Image: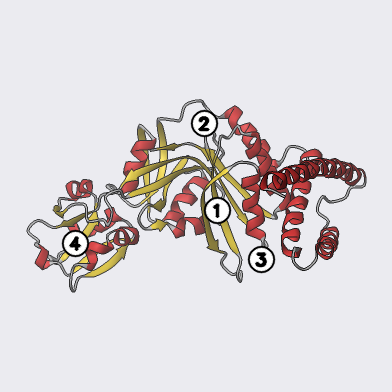
Amino acid sequence: MDLQQIRQDIDSIDTQLVDLFRQRLEKAASVAEYKKQNSMSIYDPARERALLERVSDLAGEEHEANTRLIFSLLMDLSKSYQAKLLLPESKYEKIITSALEETSPLFPERATVACQGTEGAYVQVACNKLFALPNIMYNNSFEGVFNAVESGLCKYGVLPIENSTAGSVNSIYDLMMKHSFYIVRSTRVQINHCLLVKPGTKFEDINEIISHEQALSQSSDFLGSLDGVKTTAYANTALAAQAVAQSDRGDIAALGSSECAALYGLTVLKRAVQNKGSNYTRFICISKKPEIYPGADRTSLMLILPHKPGSLYKIISRFYAHGINMTKLESRPIPGSDFEFMFYFDVGTSVYSPALKQLICELETELDNFTYLGSYSEIV
């Protein structure tokens, strides 16, 4: 038998598989109707265990693992199909529909915005990119930003979420689990760290450099080249610059922007000390209520998965099945819970995509802990 004949045989088998799959979904629709009439749950764990055991025995030892994998996916697709037939509009689908109808077609130019830090921080640059005339209210902590938005003190909050050199800002992801909010827009800001000192201070005078931990991490190569110089983490780059300006010491320096130097009367001793020239920080803009503006092509989701084999794979396979591109996956341990993690996803697809709405409906139905964080666009 030649290769062409073998491939023809495979094509014939595939045709049968497609027909059998269609028949299986039609039977799943009948099951869904029965469950609806008898007020039964879509998920039947006992039935799934029995089915997997039966097909594993039928497949034999050599093909057991692959057979279980295929039929696990088949059952997931069956449950999704039943959910689509049975469930009314989901909670988050209603939220998305309402936000699309009620949100202004133009992003506001003026707003009261909560930020962490003080004047001269990189978050101020992000605010100016997002809003034409932001009224910035500075907070001492990232949690203060979340609280200001939740309480209604500020309509929006702007927070750093990741850096191209140092990675994710883990404290933000941890706070996401504690607070209720929606992401309405994001932006990227190029970060150029400068070594800032009081006028008259020289390189050989410096014994300590202070800045935000992310700035220190992003400039590790430069800092590692300085012998005997201590580094100290500060709450914010601008606060570090302010502290140097107000200090009586002549041996202390800060990592911050050139704008901070002008603002606090410092001298730029060395420019662009970060490890990479293309150093960007991504900032998110959050609000208390969902707002979805035209062009929203990014959606953020947060979920907690059961601690058992294959949980994450089953979720990721859904993205693939729906043709949705996952652009970011982040995991964070859940405080007080052994070996359980919160997973954060960014997906790149239009908010108008039926596939996105179907995915959200499925995740909301099947997971006990699932949160839709918003659909938005990003300003580069």
The residue pinned by badge 2 equals 293
Tally of marks:
4
Horizontal arrangement in the rendering, residue 104 relative to residue 1 (left or right): left
- Which comes sooner in the sequence, label 3 or label 2? 2
Q: Which amino acid is tagged 4? A: Ala
- Which comes sooner in the sequence, label 4 or label 1? 4
User: Would residue 295 be visible to someone looking at this image?
Assistant: yes
The residue pinned by badge 3 equals 307
Horizontal arrangement in the rendering, residue 331 relative to residue 255 (left or right): right
Q: Secondary structure at mark 4?
A: strand
Q: Answer few, some or many: residues within 10 Å of disc 4's Cα (few below 14, many 20 plus, some between 14 and 19).
A: many
Q: What's the distance in space between the residues labelled 4 and 1, CA to CA?
A: 36 Å
- Which comes sooner in the sequence, label 1 or label 3? 3
Horizontal arrangement in the rendering, residue 163 relative to residue 27 (left or right): left
* Residue 69 or residue 235, whichever sits in front: 69
Q: Which amino acid is tagged 1? A: Tyr
Q: Secondary structure at mark 3?
A: loop
* Residue 52 or residue 357, whichever sits in front: 52
How far from the left and from the top, in percent, is residue 53? 83, 64
Res 344 label:
1
Q: Which amino acid is tagged 2? A: Tyr
The residue pinned by badge 4 equals 253
Q: Which amino acid is tagged 3? A: His
